[in-house]
Image (cartoon, rainbow, N blue to C red):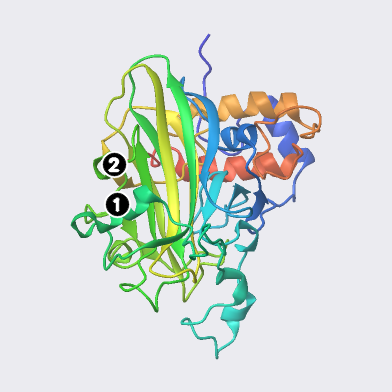
Amino acid sequence: MSRMFTLDRRCLSGRLAAMLCLAAGASVAQAQIATVVTTDSAALASALHPSGGLVINSVVVRNGKPGQIGTFAKFDLPPVSIRDGVVLSSGSVENLTPLAEVLDPAYDSCCPPARVNSQMTFDTDPDGNFLSGGTDEFDAYGSHANNIENFSASFDVAAIDVHFTLPVASQVRFDFIFGSVEFPYYTSSFTDAFLVFLDGTQPNDQVTFDANNAAVQVGVSFAGLETTADVNTAFAAPHGLIHHLTTTTAELAAGDHTLTFEVGDVNDHILDSVVFIADLRAQAGVEGTHPSDDCRGDYDHSGTVTVSDLFNFLDRWFIEFGLTDEDQELTADFTDNGVVAVDDLFGFLDAWFAEFGTCGES
């Protein structure tokens, strides 16, 4: 049965109108980014919110030290946002909230505070030689054909392998934001980078590129795609991040595949970089990496904000209202605070009205 709908805030449905009257004056709760350090396969798989038939079988840590890998939520304050997901850092993912120090007029962007200026690897080999904490595939890619500007070696690389299955032949997509406190002071000599390998780790298996058809990296990648306006994380002005991008693969055969995500320091251990990865899904799109919108009103992950998103969200919200994440897995917890409440309704409505008919990925 089809449902009739008029785009009018005053009359969405009888149930919704009643709730709006009861909750009049409520405000949407928003907060700075929250991270959880974890290498648990199930937690990381769940945080990537697989959809479109794609099934994540496991997420395996390929490289990195405790603290470099985890999940994130509440990256939702405008003008930069991304849905909850997995975070990888060349430093500690615990230390990514906004920096109070940058408000000091004397703040020098060449020397960020210690919490985002971390050396994570202090290991030595059996002969006592110092280890960088890099990976062979990062080094091979970076040194090949000047893929990473002025590359000599990788350090403190955080890397995971995501093993997944496609029930039918499909393209695969994921969203990401890459940030670095190397920007704006060091943008050529220390070109921290984000790499993604598909079904192999040879240089030609790398599938994520910037607008210059180069690997996503400090320096050339920040030309034209950067913003210093983020207020959710440590990458606010004068630092920056490259936002919101979507990588779409070529069509992949049905069956098992692996995506390897890696972020690392280049040419030194210090000044941390990070990648936020969200929404791994089977979905058709334009192959390559393109700027995209974080359509938080796209509840059904179709790529377009429609009336169906509104009714689907409302159905879940009325079912889950008052429940907590201890009761069950929640899909209507829009504010990601562990309980479905009126704030979630107003938050979703704000996003839905702002994005309806205009928000779609490239």
Secondary element type, mark 1: helix
Q: Are marks 2 and 1 in contact (CB under 8 Å)?
A: yes
- Residue 99, how many percent across, how many down? 61, 72
Q: Position of 224 compared to 360: left or right?
A: left
| The C terminus lies in quadrant | top left
Amino acid type assigned to the residue bearing label 2 in the image: Gln
Secondary element type, mark 2: loop
- Residue 103, how many percent across, how many down? 59, 81
Q: 65 or 312: nearer the eye? A: 65
Q: Looking at this view, name the residue that lies furthest to the bottom.
A: 106
Where is mark 2, residue-wise? 202
Q: 322 or 324: nearer the eye? A: 324
Where is mark 1, residue-wise? 140
Q: Position of 299 compared to 265: left or right?
A: right
At 26% across and 36% down in the image, what residue appears? 287
Residue 94 placement: quadrant: bottom right
- Residue 155, how many percent across, how many down? 45, 62
From this view, report whether residue 89 is shown above or below residue 115: above
From this view, report whether residue 194 is shown above or below residue 13: below
Q: Position of 179 compared to 40: left or right?
A: left
- Residue 214, how many percent across, how many down? 24, 55
